[in-house]
């Protein structure tokens, strides 16, 4: 029992230390994902360690201290995504002069054939914007009824990186980019909301750091930073939605948020884990919706499973372009700038 505890404690400490290395290799980044699971194991090891070792030798004391330090670090990383933290995106308290905007985002899983479940959920929410990822031609054909109700941008692909975008509001300009790889698209659109109000909408789905997809996060990180830089230099209010294949607390996601000056509606509210929908023990917040500071939150919820390995996200916001000064994202630091420059130079 004692030997098992020691081995598990050492492995846990190593798993917490590896992501601190400045590396884009996949295993380094992937170990940032299971922060919640690691926290549960840390608590278990601390409790059982205190029970097993009544008069602990020095090595056990050192391991207990490292576990306590690890526990503090884990709490520091995930606390912003709990109700104990002040919400970064303010709640809407009045609707005067604002435009309601609702968004439905779902990685449908290309090989999922339960098309009607997704359509039924869309009919339930009646969103203004629909973002569907991992969509091929069959998915586009199965959802063709949406074309009569929405403006659309369709980029179906057979490589699990297809995108479908539907908008109740007029799409004034649109571009399908291939920023990093010629088979991985991103969508950029200018949406006209009426009364001369316009917003920029980005949809992204970079490669995951996983063998068979990518051995490192270089391309994913570069795509996120490129999009963030474009948003930072853009005068229009912006929304970014998609499967970032990255957790909310990762270094790259936080860099993206800082560089783009965007806010995360989950901060101060919850994790809203979207992957893996079929495994309750391995769940991470991989699907994201970020906003510039002109938006306020009305409602945020995770949808029910539609047959995919991801849960959908649904969010209602209000927009009037008058809130830029009373809510803001984190400031970008000199060390952040250095890391951004390093990512873009590789």
Image (cartoon, rainbow, N blue to C red):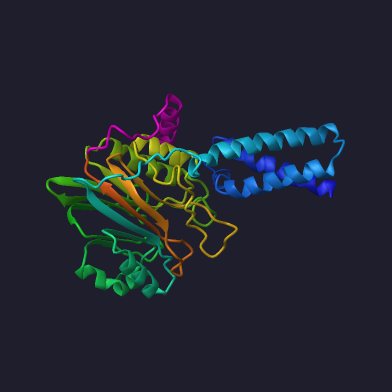
Q: Residue at x 52, y 57 (%)?
A: 212
Q: Position of residue 318 (x, y in %)?
A: 27, 48
Q: Is residue 274 left or right of residue 177?
A: right
Left or right of residue 37: residue 185:
left
Return the residue nearer the eye: 243 or 342: 243
Query: What residue is drawn where x is 42% and y is 50%?
Result: 244
Q: Nearer the viewer, residue 92 or 277?
A: 92
Please report the residue visible at 81 percent of the width from the left and 44 percent of the height from the top. Answer: 51
Q: Is residue 140 magenta?
A: no
Vertical placement of residue 174 versus 339, above or below: below
Q: Where is residue 228 drawn, in percent x and y?
A: 34, 40
Counting labels gives 0
Position of 74 with respect to 154 (left or right) is right
Determine whether 157 is above or below 46 in the image.
below
Above-or-below relation of 314 to 196: below
Looking at this view, is 227 or 120 the one in front? 120
* Camera-nearest residue between 174 and 26: 174
Whether the magenta-drawn stretch holds residue 340 is answered as yes
Q: Position of residue 194 (x, y in %)?
A: 14, 51
Image coordinates for residue 278, horizontal then vertical, percent: 54, 65
Q: Range of the magenta residues?
A: 322-346
State which quarter of the image contains the C terminus: top left
Residue farthest along the left direction in this orientation: 195
Examine the image and state in which quarter residue 46 appears: top right
């Amino acid at each position: 029992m004692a030997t098992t505890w020691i081995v598990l404690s050492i492995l846990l400490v190593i798993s917490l230390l590896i992501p601190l290395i400045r590396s884009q290799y996949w295993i380094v980044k992937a170990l940032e994902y299971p922060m919640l699971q690691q926290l549960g194991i840390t608590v278990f090891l601390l409790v059982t360690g205190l029970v097993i070792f009544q008069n602990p030798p020095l090595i056990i004391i050192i391991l207990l201290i490292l576990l306590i330090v690890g526990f503090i670090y884990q709490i520091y990383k995930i606390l912003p995504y709990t109700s104990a933290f002040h919400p970064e995106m303010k709640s809407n308290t009045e609707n005067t002069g604002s435009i309601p905007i609702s968004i439905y985002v779902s990685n449908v899983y290309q090989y999922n054939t339960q098309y009607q479940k997704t359509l039924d959920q869309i009919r339930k929410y009646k969103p203004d914007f629909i973002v569907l990822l991992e969509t091929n031609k069959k998915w586009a054909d199965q959802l063709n009824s949406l074309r009569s109700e929405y403006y659309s941008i369709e980029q179906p692909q057979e490589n699990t990186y297809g995108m479908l975008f539907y908008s109740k509001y007029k799409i004034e300009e649109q571009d399908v980019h291939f920023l990093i790889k010629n088979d991985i698209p991103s969508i950029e659109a200018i949406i006209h909301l009426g009364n001369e109000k316009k917003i920029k909408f980005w949809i992204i789905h970079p490669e995951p750091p996983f063998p068979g997809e990518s051995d490192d996060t270089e391309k994913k990180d570069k795509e996120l930073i490129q999009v963030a830089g474009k948003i930072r230099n853009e005068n229009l209010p912006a929304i970014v939605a998609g499967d970032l294949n990255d957790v909310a607390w990762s270094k790259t996601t936080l860099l993206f948020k800082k560089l783009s000056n965007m806010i995360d509606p989950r901060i101060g509210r919850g994790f809203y884990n979207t992957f893996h929908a079929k495994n309750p023990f391995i769940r991470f917040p991989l699907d994201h919706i970020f906003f510039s500071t002109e938006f306020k939150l009305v409602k945020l919820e995770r949808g029910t499973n539609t047959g995919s390995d991801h849960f959908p996200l649904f969010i209602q916001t209000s927009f009037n372009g008058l809130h830029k000064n009373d809510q803001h994202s984190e400031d970008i630091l000199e060390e952040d700038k250095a890391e951004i420059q390093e990512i873009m130079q590789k």
